[in-house]
Image (tube, rainbow, N blue to C red):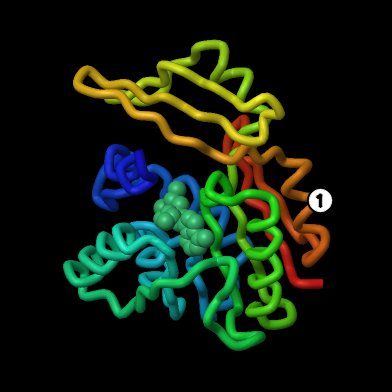
Amino acid sequence: MTFEEYYSAFKAYSDIHSEEYRKRIENLEPLLMKFMKEKGKVLDLGCGAGGFSFLLEDLGFTVIGADNSDYMLSLARGFAKEKGSKVEFIKADARELPFEDSTFDYVLFIDNLVHFEPLDLGKAFREIARILKPGGRLLLQFTDLRALLPVLMNGQVIGAEYWISKVMPDREEKTVLIEFQSEEKSFRVRFNVWGKTAVELLAKLYFKKVGEEQINEHTYLQVYEPK
Ligand code: SAM
């Protein structure tokens, strides 16, 4: 199962018109705005279907969306066409970004950590710090999967259509293979397990933390500026 198939099964990531996607935007918008008072140039990194790019464009920011998945970019470009959006969606890898130093006032990095192994997240953070202007901000939203793992392993069910049928961490709990099940099918996806402490320690190499909001029991928005 590829990540693309996983995302296409979950409207919260693939359909910006779905209730699930709109809820994510509704929850995060006031928190983002708390830390994005000045308008400016934004990179929505790992933009997926582009919902947060469109939100910020509508609010008066100049936005570029970047993702390394052709499938997710095709969704974003389709929604852009439908909306008459001017957001430019480009293919780029967070570990090596095709932008000059000090280009952006803000970088959004929302719900992406599960894709990144430790070395890769280090590279992505270094790139984000490089392309941010001095005083620019990284808005990092992530779920503390390390804290959530025992809850998932306890057999908690999530989602209306799909539920979690198996949770299989590797021996060191650096990654976890999660099996999702619906009435029709089941599939498995491997996630990198990031805990809040590990994220903060890594971020500390490149950034200083200037803000934090807890979105729900295990999900955070953290705000960083380059050192
Ligand atoms: N930020 C979007 C949102 O909140 O709707 C999408 C989140 S989705 C859970 C994670 C996204 O990160 C996917 O679109 C995936 O293709 C992208 N991604 C994963 N690894 C990446 C990388 N190395 N560089 C750029 N994008 C990446």
Left or right: residue 86 versus residue 194 is left
Residue located at (28% from left, 44% from top): 8
Q: Quadrant of the C terminus?
A: bottom right
Q: Which of 121 and 21 is in front in this view?
A: 121
Q: What element carries label 1?
A: helix
Q: Under 8 Å from ligand 1: the CB of mark 1? A: no
Residue located at (49% from left, 36% from top): 190
Q: Residue furthest top?
A: 154
Q: Can you tell which quarter of the image residue 161 is in?
A: top left
Q: Nearer the viewer, residue 23 or 65?
A: 65
Q: Which of 125 and 80 is in front in this view?
A: 125
Left or right: residue 183 versus residue 178 is left
Left or right: residue 7 versus residue 124 is left
Residue 126 image offset from top left, x and y in percent: 71, 69
Q: Which residue lies furthest to the front in this view?
A: 171
* Amino acid marked by disc 1: Leu
Q: In which quarter of the image is the N terminus?
A: top left
Above or below, 55 against 16 in this view is below
Question: Which residue lies under the disc numbered 1?
Answer: 201
Residue located at (41% from left, 16% from top): 165
Q: Can you tell which quarter of the image residue 130 is in?
A: bottom right
Left or right: residue 214 versus residue 16 is right
Residue 112 image offset from top left, x and y in percent: 53, 51
Q: Can you tell which quarter of the image residue 102 is in?
A: bottom right
